[in-house]
Amino acid sequence: MKTQRLRTQRVRTRRGRIRTTGAVRATGAVRATGAVRMAGIVRATRALAAAVCLAAALPGQAWAAGESPYTFDEAAEQVKGAASSLDAEQLKAGRTYRDAIKKDGKLYYRVDLDAKQNAYVSVVAVPKPGGKAEYGDGIKVSLQDGSGTQCDYQDALFGSAGFTRPIAAYAHRTIKPDSSTCQQAGAYYVLVERTSKAVSTPDDWALEIRHLAEPGVKQTGPTELPDNWPSSSPQPPGGGPQKRQGGAGFHDATSLRQGEWRDDIKPGQTLFYRVPVDWGQQIFASAELGSSAAGDTYVGNALVLSLDNPARGHVDEDTVSYDGDPATLALDAHRPVAFQNRYSSDSNTNALRFAGWYYLSATLSPEIAKAYGDKPVPLTLRVNVTGTAKAGPAYDGDAGPFTVTEDDRDAAASGQSGAEAGKSDGMRLVAAAGIGAGTVLILVLGVWTVVARRRVAGASQDGRQDGRSDGPPQFGPPTAW
C-alpha cells in the first residue's frame, strides 16, 4: 500500500499540468522525462518547419491599386523624416525605406558611418502622374556631418519637361586619402529638400530611400583620369529589334544587354530598364519614338531618357520633341566606368564610379494624349556596351551591388527584372533553409531513437527489480509528436 500511495500522489501546478511527486517506478520517470524533452524538441521543429513554409508561401507585398504606377520595393520599411537632425531616424545600410514629402518640405534622416566605407543615400521622388512641374522643381539630397559641413549633394530636377515623373538623386561620403572633410566615423545626416513653384502641383511626393555601403579598398590606386578615352558613339547594335517590356520602377526594372529593344509607352508613363556595365566598359543609349497617323501636332520635350548609376545617382538625361514623325534622342558619350572617376569634378564622370546595374528610364509626356490620343506610342531603345571588362579594385569586403556577376549577365540575356532576380535569390535561401530543416528533423529522429532505447532499457531493468511490468515495451514516437 505504501508503494501504491507514493505512485498516485500528484500535485496540480499553476498552469494546470500534473506534476508527479514522491517515489515512482524507474519506468515512469524515464517516460515522463523523455516525453517532456521530446515535446520541447517537437515544438521547436514544428516552429522551424512552419517558418520555412511561411517564407516559401508569402508573396511580395502589393501596394494598393491606383496608389501609384511606380513599383516600390516590396521590402521597403516605413520611416518618418524629422524636422530636426537631432530627431532623425536612422537608415541602416543595405535597406530601403518609404516616406513622403510635402511641398517645400525638408526632411532629415540619420546614418551612422565608420571611417573605412563609402556611403550612398539615394532618394527617388515619385509625384502623382500627370502633375504640373515648373523648371527648377525637384529635390535636393545632401549629406552632412555632425558640425553641419556638407559632404556632398545632388539635385534632381524636372527641367524643361514640365510634367511630373519619378526622379532620383543621391548624396555620398567618399573616403579620400588627401581629404579631412567627412572622413571621421560618427553620425551623419541626410537632408531631403523639395523645391516647387507656386503654380506647381501641391500634392505630396512619395519617397523611396536607399542606403548603400561600398567597402574601402585594400590599396589606393591612381586618382588621375587618362586624357584620352573613346568618345565617339558606336554603330547601332545589329540583330534587329527584340520585344522587351519595361518595368515600373527601379525595383522591377527590366534587364537588357546590348541590342535594339522594342516596347510601347503610354502618355504619362515611365518605363525602367537596367543594363550591367562592368569596370572599363561604356554604356551608350538612344531612344526613338515611332511615327503616328493621328496627326502632326508639335509636343515639346515629349520623351525624356535618363541614366542613373547602381546607387541610383543621376548620370545624364536628354529630351526630344514629337510631331507625329519618328523622333530620336541619344545620351552623350561618357567615360568608361572606373574607380578613379570618383575623383573627377565633372558630375557625369563622377557618377560613373563603379560597376553594376545602370538604369535607363523613359517617360512620355502626358501632353501626347491630348494631341494623339491615349494609345501607346511605339518606343525603341538602342543600347551599346563597349570595351573589355577589367578587374575591379581590391575591395576590403564584399562588393555587393558594385560589381557584375555571371548571374547578372544571364539576367540581362533573359530579360529578367530586378524583382524576379530578388525572388530567385529568396527561393535559394528558402531552399537552403529547407535543407537545414531537414537536417534538424534527422537530428530529432536520432534523439528520439536514443530516448526510446533508454526508455526500453530502463523498463526492462525496472521489471527485473520489482518483478512487475506494465506490458510490452512501447515503441514509436512520443504521444506529443
Image (tube, helix red, strand yellow):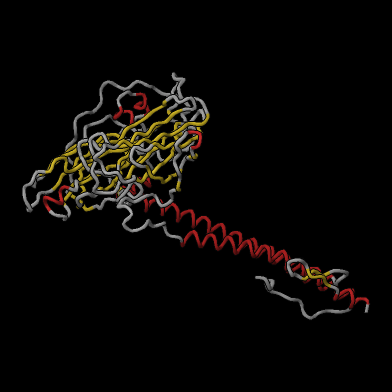
How many marks overall? 0
* Vertical placement of residue 410 versus 443, above or below: above
Expressed as whole percent of the image width and height from the top left, the position of residue 400 reads 44, 40
Q: Is residue 348 left or right of residue 330?
A: right
Q: Nearer the viewer, residue 399 or 246?
A: 246
* Residue lying at the far right of the rendered structure: 2
Query: Would you say residue 239 is visible in this rendering?
Result: no
Q: Is residue 63 above or below residue 90?
A: below
Which quarter of the image is occupied by the C terminus? Answer: bottom right
Q: Nearer the viewer, residue 390 or 158?
A: 158
Horizontal side of residue 439 vs 13, given as left or right: left
The structure residue drawn at horizontal position 88% and vertical position 69%, both measured from the top left corner, is 23
**Of residues 33 and 470, the one drawn nearer to the viewer in this rendering:** 33
Q: Quadrant of the N terminus?
A: bottom right
Residue 151 position within the rendered picture, expressed as x and y whole percent measured from the top left: 42, 26
The residue most toward the top is: 178
Instruction: Tell me: residue 440, above or below residue 285.
Output: below
Q: Is residue 286 left or right of residue 182?
A: left
x 39%, y 28%: residue? 152
* Residue 30 image position (x, y, % from top left): 79, 68
